[in-house]
Image: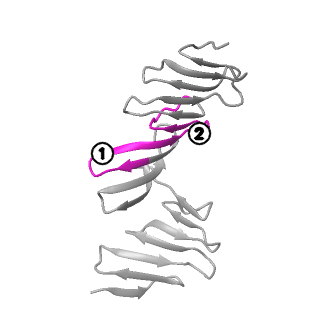
């Protein structure tokens, strides 16, 4: 059966189905956080300010999720066949959006801490780096700090196919349009 019992502190309840699987919901005192614990370890809390923390006891925003064991913090999906995940790349802390089709996962978008965004690549080398596994073109925008080009279109071998310089000159098959 299920047992609901009061804890030793005010505003503390225990819900358990046996001695091993005790789930603790506690506030400690009026106005304090609600915490969810498993096996005596806090897993989630809602602060008096309405901030939710998962794997953190001090959420800094409306929802704060920490996980040191997985790159995927949030998953959305239809069963386990089709899923989207949002998380961070363990190697550099980048934000990653992945898609899963039931057989394999793919990095769909990668947002580096330096501001570079990659679509189809986990190593964006410019402000916007678009790559395709089907030998499609790679688009590279020069951005405001670039004095050479406003737009590059390259093939999968990194050869320039089209170049638009900041001065408006367009080159096809040349890296120096005039």
Task: Using the rendered view, name the quadrant where residue 155 is placed.
Answer: top left
Closer to the camera in the image, 106 or 134: 134
**Residue at image coords 42%, 53%:** 85
**Dot in front, 1 or 2:** 1
- The x and y percentages for residue 39 are 37, 68
The residue where tag 1 is placed is 104
Q: Secondary structure at mark 1?
A: loop
Residue 109 on the magenta span: yes
Q: Which mark is residue 113?
A: 2
Image: 107 above or below 101: above
Secondary structure beneath dot 2 equals loop
Establish if 34 lies above or below 90: below
Residue at the spot 42% in from the left edge and 24% down from the top edge: 156
* Residue 11 left/right relative to 43: right
| Residue 106 in the figure: left or right of residue 123 | left
The segment highlighted magenta reads 98-125
What residue is at 46 percent from the left and 48 percent from the top? 97
Q: CA distance from mark 1 to mark 2?
A: 26 Å
How far across and down, in percent of the image, does residue 44 sit?
Answer: 48, 67
122 within the magenta span:
yes
Of callouts 1 and 2, the N-terminal one: 1
Identify the image quadrant of the N terminus: bottom left
Q: Nearer the viewer, residue 105 or 19?
A: 105
Crowd class of label 1 (few under 14; some 14 to 19; many from 20; radius 10 Å): few
Q: How many marks?
A: 2
Q: Nearer the viewer, residue 4 or 88?
A: 88
């Amino acid at each position: 059966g299920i047992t609901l019992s009061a804890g030793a502190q005010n505003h503390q309840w225990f819900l358990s189905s046996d001695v091993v699987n005790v789930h603790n919901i506690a506030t400690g005192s009026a106005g304090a956080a609600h915490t969810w614990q498993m096996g005596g370890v806090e897993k989630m809390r809602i602060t008096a300010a309405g901030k939710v923390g998962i794997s953190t006891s001090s959420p800094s925003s409306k929802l704060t999720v920490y996980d040191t064991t997985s790159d995927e913090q949030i998953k959305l999906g239809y069963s386990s066949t089709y899923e989207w995940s949002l998380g961070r790349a363990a190697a550099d802390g980048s934000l990653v959006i992945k898609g899963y089709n039931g057989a394999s996962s793919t990095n769909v978008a990668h947002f580096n801490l330096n501001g570079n965004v990659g679509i189809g690549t986990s190593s964006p080398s410019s402000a916007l780096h678009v790559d395709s596994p089907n030998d499609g073109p790679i688009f590279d925008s020069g951005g405001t700090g670039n004095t050479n080009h406003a737009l590059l279109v390259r093939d999968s071998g990194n050869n320039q196919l089209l170049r638009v310089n900041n001065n408006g000159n367009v080159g096809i098959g040349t890296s120096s349009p005039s």
